[in-house]
Amino acid sequence: MIAPLPSPVGGFVHKVDAYAIGIALIGLGAGRKVASDTLDHDVGLTGIVHIGDPIAEGEPLCILHCRSESDFDTAAAAITAVITIGDTRPDRRPVVTGRLSTLD
């Protein structure tokens, strides 16, 4: 099942908790709890919103790729809960904030 996850409200994306989304995706089989777990390469998400993006109610927060409607419902609830949408556009933060290297 591949389906959009609709935004419950309109506004601007203020926060996306990547860690919590990763945990939700582990529940779908897209990640491992332990090294011996197998990965399901057919599940996951695409097209996720970014901080500062405008979004209307009903527009997709992301596209979920799931094995079942039950998996979709579980992941949708978890992901919707950790994406915060506000009324005003937040300041955009740079994607890259620094560089770490052993060569410096």
Image (cartoon, rainbow, N blue to C red):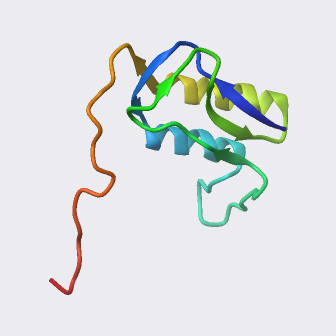
Q: Residue at x 45, y 42 (%)?
A: 18
Q: Is residue 62 above or below residue 44?
A: above
Question: In which quadrant of the rendered image does the C terminus lie?
Answer: bottom left
Q: Residue at x 23, y 72 (%)?
A: 100
Residue 59 lies left or right of residue 54; in this view the side is right
Examine the image and state in which quarter residue 76 appears: top right
Q: Position of residue 4 (x, y in %)?
A: 71, 31
How many labels, in total?
Answer: 0
Q: Residue at x 59, y 59 (%)?
A: 34
Question: In which quadrant of the rendered image does the N terminus lie?
Answer: top right
Residue 76 lies left or right of residue 66; in this view the side is left
Residue 4 lies left or right of residue 91; in this view the side is right
Q: Residue at x 59, y 53 (%)?
A: 33
Q: Position of residue 46 (x, y in %)?
A: 64, 46
Examine the image and state in which quarter residue 51 appears: top left
Front residue of 98/78: it is 98
Q: Is residue 57 above or below residue 39?
A: above
Q: Position of residue 3 (x, y in %)?
A: 77, 33
Q: Is residue 45 above or below residue 14?
A: below
